Amino acid sequence: MKTYYGDREKCYNCFRPKSSCMCEYFEKIQTQTKFVILIHPKEFKKVKNNTGHFTHKSLPNSELFMGIDFSNHRRINEIIATHESFILFPSVNAINLTTTNPKKSEKPLAIFLIDSTWACTKKMFTLSLNLNKLRHMSFTTSRTSAYEIKVQPDEAYLSTIESTLVVLEALDKHKIEKIETVQLENFLNPFLEMIKYQKELINNPKSHAVRFKRHTSK
């Protein structure tokens, strides 16, 4: 589906201009695990470069919500009540998914991901009383972020979609999920293609203008 903003046609699925639509690169992975992506309003506005949207579109068993305080959010509280729920949040008490299988009950697993800057994440986590009660989950990885067009606060920080890939690999290792290797290898494709596109645009802005002109003249 496409929608128009001003004189530019945009893809309603990946929220990017049609001229740089990334939908063809999505590797959809069906999981037993429910992924819940929580986006701060400030991050939600960055739809063109937001990897939370890419993560949501790549995981059919995921839900995405925008807000700051989710304490009384009906659907989120419903998920927490019916799932064995964790939030990806580094702390001294966090379960290390890389080495530990988190499944301890027959309930389906739910993993909450906060997609925001670190400062906004802390505010969301502090205000949302229901999130405060969730068990923490972390992981250990040697990966470094490929997010070259965005300055990360530390080289160990990963984008939402990169962190989700590490989680998927660990879930597969623990046999909580059964994911084909090629699916994992292709999971970051929309993210990597977005970076490639942005770098080309930075290095040669005229090529973008030509591309847009060709699109609008059709």
Image (spheres, grey):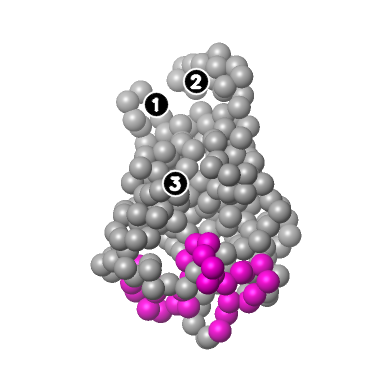
Which corner quadrant of the image does residue 7 belong to? top left
Checking the image for residue 32, the label placed there is none
Q: Distance of mark 2 from mark 1, alpha carbons?
A: 9 Å
Image spot of residue 56 (x, y percent): 48, 54
Q: Horizontal placement of 192 versus 16: left or right?
A: right
- How would you rate the neighbour count of disc 3 (Cα within 10 Å): few for under 14, some for 14-19, many for 20 or more? some
| Between discs 2 and 1, the one toward the N terminus | 1
On screen, residue 3 above or below 128: above
Callout 2 touching callout 1 (CB < 8 Å): yes
- The residue beneath circle 2 is 212
Relative to 164, say whether 195 is above or below: above
> With respect to residue 197, does 78 lie above or below?
below
Q: Can residue 107 be seen in this view?
A: yes
Amino acid type for the residue under numbered disc 2: Phe
Judged from this view, the residue extending furthest toward the left is 72
Which is in the foreground here, disc 3 or disc 1? 3
Residue indicated by mark 1 = 8
Residue located farthest toward the right when viewing the structure as drawn = 181
Which residue occupies 73% across, 60% down?
A: 181
The numbered disc on residue 117 is 3
Range drawn in magenta? 76-104
- Give the residue displayed 26% in from the left and 67% down from the top: 72
Q: Where is residue 100 in the image (x, y as percent from the top left)?
A: 64, 75
Q: Position of residue 188 (x, y in %)?
A: 63, 48
